Image (tube, rainbow, N blue to C red):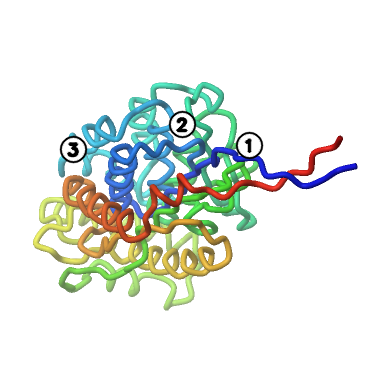
Amino acid sequence: MGFPVYRKRKPVIGIALGSGAAKGYAHIGVLKVLEDLKIKPDIITGTSMGALVGALYASGYLSKDIEELANKIDKKEVKKLFKITFDGAGLVNGELLNKYIDSLLPVETFDKLKITFGCVACNIIDGREFNFTKGFLRDAVRASISIPGIITPKILKNYALVDGGLVNPVPVSLCRKLGANIVIAVNVLHTPVLKCKCTDFPVVEKVAEYGLQKGEKITNFNEKIKSMIKQELEVIENKAKIIGSLLNLNDKLNIIDVISQTFMIAESNLANFRLSVDKPDFLIQPDMSSIKHFDFYKSNEAILLGEKEMWKYAAESKLVDRLKNYEPTKRFIQR
């Protein structure tokens, strides 16, 4: 006859790192504090920037190692990695990103990772969520960070994969699917406010004159955009005001800001909804409104924002005590 007994078990701790491009540097700050608190994850999941940070951490990097990598990226490096090419499916070709990701990751495949890891992409063909838990790590990360319209999709077999933020910005559900019974989630999209001044968009106005308002076919529209941009690209790049630069000089909006900000607003709303359904046990939401999507040269500021919020949250939520006093799980033992 069976009877219920309580067996004390160590919780399986999962960390879900959300999307947010440069805002995702805050994940490094969160991981730094968790290390100081002696909280080690058994499972990590990530979307977009969360996928890259999560993959590095699962590979064996410590937060200080990832921080060191982040601090090496300056404005010149950002321009190089996100050079405008107009490849049709995105403003930025992903080849340089592929090489960069390869240079960062110390392992090639999921089965070589030191911590169980999964990341999220979206199949742009049918709009479904695509979860990576095996295979080549670089392909998974490259797919997960591909912001629609900006970075070209990652093509794998019959899938055209883009940023997982379209479907699951903070992958709590994947974390639980992989076996976590305690999930710490980090949402850097909680405050989708862009703190910068607006400017005029002469290139955008010309695009409107050329294309869809005249009822032209998409293919012709796309070719005319390329033709028009090609003539002005040198001027645009030199002035770094509209589309030749992602560096947001003089604190002005450019077309990349508009695309990424639009995407982030949609992600933020979806993240809030998903987190109300796929509720984590702990939710950290730093205010990242001072960091734009492509402010990858502001790693110090972003990491510090994540670090401060994590320390504050750990104190207010009594995180360490709650993990130590994790409730025993009821099991039926046969006798």
Instruction: Give the image location of residue 95, x and y in percent.
Output: 39, 34
Q: Amino acid at mark 1?
A: Lys
Q: Are marks 3 and 2 in contact (CB under 8 Å)?
A: no
Q: Report the disc number at residue 58.
A: none
Q: Secondary structure at mark 1?
A: loop
- Residue visible at 42% across and 46% down? 145
Residue highlighted by disc 2 = 138
Q: Residues within 10 Å of mark 3 (few under 14, many from 20)?
A: few
Residue highlighted by disc 3 = 71
Q: Amino acid at mark 3?
A: Asn
Q: Is residue 17 above or below residue 97?
A: below
Q: Earlier in the sequence, mark 3 or mark 1?
A: 3
Mark 3 and mark 1: Cα distance apart in space: 35 Å
- Residue visible at 44% across and 64% down? 267
Q: Earlier in the sequence, mark 1 or mark 2?
A: 2
Residue highlighted by disc 1 = 157
- 298 with respect to 87 (left or right): left
Instruction: Give the image location of residue 142, x and y in percent.
Output: 44, 39
- Number of numbered discs: 3
Which part of the image, by quadrant, shows the C terminus? Answer: top right
Q: Are marks 1 and 2 in contact (CB under 8 Å)?
A: no
Mark 3 and mark 2: Cα distance apart in space: 21 Å
Q: Are marks 3 and 1 in contact (CB under 8 Å)?
A: no
Q: Picture quarter containing residue 289?
A: bottom left
Q: Residues within 10 Å of mark 1 (few under 14, many from 20)?
A: few
Please indicate, yes or no, whether residue 35 appears anywhere in the rendered image.
yes
